[in-house]
Image (tube, helix red, strand yellow):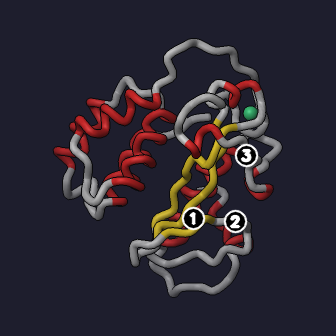
Amino acid sequence: MVLDKLEILKDLFYGFGRDPHVNKGIFDHYLSKTSDTEPWVLKKAVQELLAGCQSLPRINDLLNSIKRFTPVAEHTTENCPKCGKDGLIYSIYCLKPDGTRMEVYNLDHKVITGAHYTTMIIGRCKCINGDQYAQVSHGSLSRAVEPLSYLLNSKWDSAFEASVIAKRLNKMANDFKPPTEKPMEKQLNKYDKS
Ligand SMILES: [Zn+2]
């Protein structure tokens, strides 16, 4: 799957109430320091920091976290409809304007105006790609899980589907039209082509 490192770092900044555009200098610094990092490793590191820190972590804290998640050995991979090749299963989370967050469990979710939607790793895939994480100490990685059914897409893996839907949800949540109470299923099609 293709994970956008820009988007991952934006999650980090928004998660601590820092606008990446306003803090462009420091944002670009973080981006260049992580240029060699695998996107999923960056994702996992950012997720850990979002859960454990009170304010935007220093670049060294981010690099240390990246180091902890970088696999030490080469491993074999296979194409998998659930995880792609990474062996990781993602879910979508809604970071609400009030600072709380909730998982998006199905297409009945009502989009919250002004919220930020992001994907998060919830566990490892049950396939051979996921086996490499079985022994790691991080609880959320070593747990074998199934992706939520609404993320299963015949065209691509569920990890990529999660990132596609999260992007659309962000457009919907920050579309400055009157808020709507309709479930997102009815609105998603409108954003399909964008
Ligand atoms: Zn898999």
SS category of the residue bearing label 3? loop
Q: Is residue 2 left or right of residue 66?
A: right
Q: Residues within 10 Å of mark 3 (few under 14, many from 20)?
A: some
Cα distance, mark 3 to mark 2?
14 Å
Mark 1 sits on what residue? Answer: 169
Q: Position of residue 29 (x, y in %)?
A: 21, 37
Q: Residue at x 25, y 58 (%)?
A: 55
Mark on residue 145?
3
Residue lying furthest right in this view?
154
Is label 2 within 8 A of ligand 1 (CB to nearest ligand atom)? no
Instruction: Assign ligand 1 to one image quadrant.
Output: top right
Name the disc covering residue 105, or none: 2
Question: In the picture provided, is 113 more to the left or to the right than 92?
Answer: left
Q: Tag 2 or tag 3, which sits nearer the N-term?
A: 2
Tell how many labels. 3
Closer to the camera, 190 or 181? 181
Determine contact: label 3, label 2, CB under 8 Å.
Answer: no
The one of 107 and 185 positioned closer to us in this rendering: 107
